[in-house]
Amino acid sequence: MSEFEILDPRFGKLVIGHAKLERLWTGGRWLEGPAYFPAGRYLVFSDIPNDQLMRYDETSGVVSVFRSPSGNGNGNTVDREGRMLSCEHKGRRITRTEFDGSVVALATHFENRRFNSPNDIVVKSDGSIWFSDPTYGIDGEYEGDAAPSEIGRANIYRLDPATGALAAVVTDRVQPNGLAFSPDERILYVSDTGSSHVEGHARTITAYEVRTDGAIASPRVFATLQAGAYDGFRIDANGNVWTSAFGGVHCYAPDGAHIGTIPIPELVSNVCFGGRKRNRLFITAQTSLYAMYVNAQGALRP
């Protein structure tokens, strides 16, 4: 297997010819939610069916259990203060892990109805927390507890952690999944995995305009797959989108062109940038954690 598939010269400038894909750990059932903590040089990621959060220590290469049970945790990220934010399928909530290790629930309901199963999560520079809420954790017993949707649809929400104000900001997707902001935060990208529930539904990443008041407008299709699905993804400092997709990690230029692929020998779920220079791409796949150094750095918030 070649390390890269270069479809556009722009991708050739983003990869390192002699860098190799590393398999850092294997033994999970469905890995997700990688989040890198630079102060400790470690990565936290989820093993959803095994109901635990895992921790990869970059200084030693050791992988250990970070938290078990995890509420069938899925997406994780780091807030502006360096604390971990997590999506829980079983708990059907958004939580924050404090510096002393205690876990605080930040949001559990929308309009007095329980969330479906929060999936992926990002933080904007103003501290607001944005997360997706598809139904995968309540669709069966494997990644959560089977239950009907109380809300009746799948949305993306914006949470103000200071006031607790919660708003449904994206309501036009079937199963909104991964999400990330462009480096200038003027675009919100959202993947839709609705083909799992609606036959023939387009496999897309949609780009939304983010207005100065926080409202979302002007959706447009940014990228489309013919097979497989876009799940989680992250953006580099130049606005390129690195996303889970059919056959590996796809890279899209800001204009929406698919410029290259990193083939992965398993189904990919999510990615994040980490390492001391934010140039190490961590990749969660079906049973394994992978990493590769690239000639790109993860975007920092304004």
Image: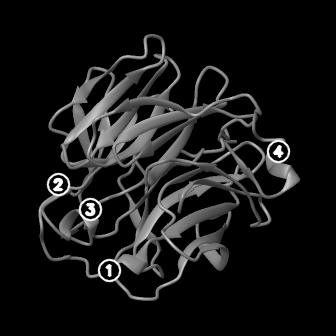
Residue 150 image point, x, y percent: 19, 76
Q: Residue at x 36, y 76 (%)?
A: 196
* Displayed quadrant of residue 289: top left
Rendering colour mode: one colour
Q: Considering the numbered disc 3 on the image, is that residue within a helix, a strand or a loop? A: loop
Point out the tag, 4 or 3, that comes first from the N-terminus: 4
Q: Which sits in the foreground, 121 or 214?
A: 121
Whether residue 29 is visible to the viewer of this picture, yes or no, is yes
> Which of these two is toward me, 263 or 234?
263
Mark 2, residue position: 90
| Pointer 2 with pointer 3, Cβ within 8 A | no
Residue 117: mark in rendering: 3
Residue placed under numbered mark 1 in the picture = 153
Q: CA distance from mark 4 to mark 3?
A: 38 Å
Badge 2 crowding class, 10 Å Cα cut-off, few under 14, some 14 to 19, many 20 or more, is many
Tell me the amino acid under the disc marked 1.
Arg
> Mark 1 and mark 2: span between their CA atoms?
18 Å
